[in-house]
Image: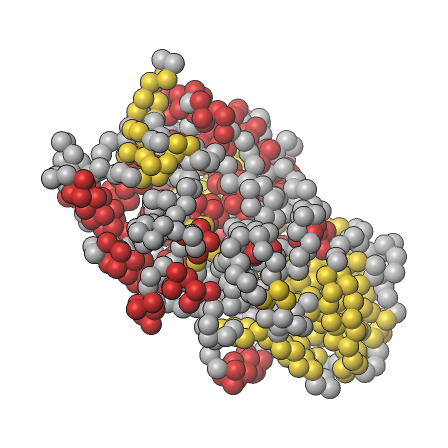
Amino acid sequence: MKHIIAIILSIMVGGQFLLGQPANFVWNTQSKNSSESMPCGGGDIGMNVWVEKGDILFYVSKSGCFDENNTLLKQGRFRVRLLPNPFEEDKDFQQILCLNEGYIQINGTDSKIYIWADVFHPIIHFEVEGKKSEIELYYESWRTEDRQISKKLEGQQSSYKWAVPKNVVTHRDSILATDCDLTFFHRNADYTVFDVTVNQQGLKKESESLYNPLKGLTFGGRISGDLVFRGNQQGIYQGQNYMAWMFKSPKAKRNHHVQITLHTAQSSLEEWIKGLRQVEEVVNLKKDKKASREWWKLFWQRSFIEGEGVPADAIRNYTLFRYMLGCNAKGEWPTKFNGGLFTFDPVNVTPDTPFSPDFRKWGGGTHTAQNQRLVYWSMLKSGDFDMMKSQFDYYNRLLHTAETRSRVYWGHGGACFTEQMENFGLPNPAEYGFKRPENFDKGLEYNAWLEYEWDTVLEFCQMILETERYSGSDITSYIPLIDSCLEFFDQHYRQLAKQRGRKELDGNNKLVLYPGSACETYKMTYNASSTIAALRKVLETYGHKPEMLERIPDIPLRIVNGYKMIAPAQIWERVNNVETPQLYPVFPWRIYGVGKDDLEIARNTYYHDPDALKFRTHIGWKQDNIWAACLGLTEEASLLMLKKMANGPHRFPAFWGPGYDWTPDHNWGGSGMIGMQEMLLQEVDSKIYLFPAWPKEWNVHFKLHATQNTTVEVSLEDGRIVDLKVFPKSRMNDIVNCLEN
């Protein structure tokens, strides 16, 4: 009987899944502009797709396409028009995101359009079927000439941010049309913002040994199909001038197929062209379509959450956002927190950014660790371990650069990774400071927010260790990274102590973590709780540096208004931002929480710390929903989750933001995913806690992952667990039903 109920639930709950398949997301009217676009992608390709005034339009982004200034450039905008036009009216119109198989279908009068990205090859397919029609395809580019970057706000799209040097431009693309195809590409010069940054930071002698992903990088692609080139047109879209290359089918047909092949390589132009051809040569439309759709089906089988009633929209948005993350599953580069692959015309985000579609705040090649981590923590419980590799490899590639910083600046070992870091491993040059005192420590950022903030890399070290605990992943290649990151803190802070006096440890033989930083918020700290928790947890999980673990001080506590709570640090000089690092020992470090000792201390921090209360919100990268869940505060967690995962301000409900960053705000979505997962399932000392912060009146059905290659699938109906599946079965003994407490 229970099994039957569970099957019925899987069919009916929230309309989100049908027999384990995510439901289609459907629009029945056309869109006004790119802000009403729908995401579509696969592999490392993202598209914003919409239909406007009968035209099908889509932006194309590909991971890793950084120009000389480290702006993440789009591949262009594509416009397709059918003749006769089946979308002249909305009468029969449908735009469908077919989540289960990862493609978009657009229906019009007697015609169907299919748009999809090959998961295993960097290729986009555009297919038309239905009554006989001609098609017109326009490739629209706003990069047809060098474009001056204005100072201050527009510079945010690049690594220069608000410190754009004179005459810095976004260089034009090369666009070459033949009678039947079009090749487009952007090729970086040898001298880039990498060289500017190296010189600024006193590392010119080391430059040849440092990782440089920008020099000679070439990216673009080719459009091919049964098409004939018909000339150029000029136009304006969302206030931006563009040039269009127009192609048309030679005759009307029932079926059309256009292929957009993309390629990125740090090579000569000749080698890039050769590589592009090699990608084109492996195409097998039928086989590739089957493989890509099968990948997406398996992706949804890894994990899911489905629900009805009050949390239905929030749960749907969880699913939609996870799809967006899945579009970069095969990417060499991590998914960017500030829009990922799905940014659109910036004037539709905020009117004070009337810039090109390439614009996003907080840079294209700049990876801010506090933000990036929130994109990736959820992938443990969702079972998307393969998608975490790009973030881990990002740090691994930069290990030598981070170790070089420690050696050159301070003469000791270990890897110093800064908080706001370029894709070549050095601090963002604008944040580092072009106007610095001549004698200021070259290893430090001359920046009130970022100085001494070095500990966020430890979260990625912990993620690496957790993937081994969850899935048995081979993490051998990352062990030097973990070891070096820990070694930096040991060597650097012992050195600083000896520079201040005779002893390198305090009176209790503990490290003195001063000067430090508790996130960007509490500055010039003495023994920040977030740093102590990070070092302690990583060392405990790592298990190879017991002598260093002995040197880590205790997490500082304090009493405020009679309540014992976690302190941000023992001492700090000032408060700069609105983070709450005194709750980091709860998450991500899980030293306090459900099933842990001293839970009341952590709850006091959540309820009574004056700054925690002042900073509390659901917006952007805020983590209050996560902490409430980890502390078993059901009412608080559910209210914050509903706010955080409510529909965003744009037509596609998972396009949140801009929050503190940009739209779509991926750390908004990521923190929402983490919080929802923690409400449903937590693991403490090998015990798996079910529904530790989930309202028992909210029906839900989920499948999530735990350590030891464990999956848990369970249905909650009317306050009762009606079906529970644990694999392997041996872990059924570890289940704790929090609804019974």
Quarter of the image where the N terminus is located: top right
State whether residue 144 appears in this view.
Answer: yes
Q: Which of 73 and 147 is in front in this view?
A: 147
Q: In this view, does 643 lie above or below 178?
A: above
Its colouring scheme is secondary structure
Place residue 139 in its image quadrant.
bottom right
Q: Residue at x 39, y 48 (%)?
A: 446
Q: Nearer the viewer, residue 690 or 487?
A: 487
Quarter of the image where the C terminus is located: top left
Q: Residue at x 11, y 39 (%)?
A: 502
- Total number of numbered labels? 0
**Residue closest to the far left:** 502
Q: In this view, does 639 lie above or below 550?
A: above
The reply, left or right, for residue 176 in relation to residue 494 is: right
Q: In this view, does 725 lie above or below 52?
A: above
Q: Can you give x and y, in whole percent of width and height, for residue 5 in the image?
A: 58, 37
Q: Residue at x 52, y 45 (%)?
A: 667
State whether residue 727 appears in this view.
Answer: no
Q: In this view, does 173 lie above or below 618?
A: below
The reply, left or right, for residue 39 in relation to residue 538 is: right
**Residue closest to the far front:** 438
Q: Can you give x and y, in whole percent of width and height, for residue 543 in the image?
A: 21, 46
Q: Residue at x 26, y 38 (%)?
A: 514
The reply, left or right, for residue 294 in relation to residue 389 is: right
**Residue closest to the far top:** 562
Q: Can you give x and y, in whole percent of width and height, for residue 464 in the image?
A: 35, 52
Place residue 244 in its image quadrant.
bottom right
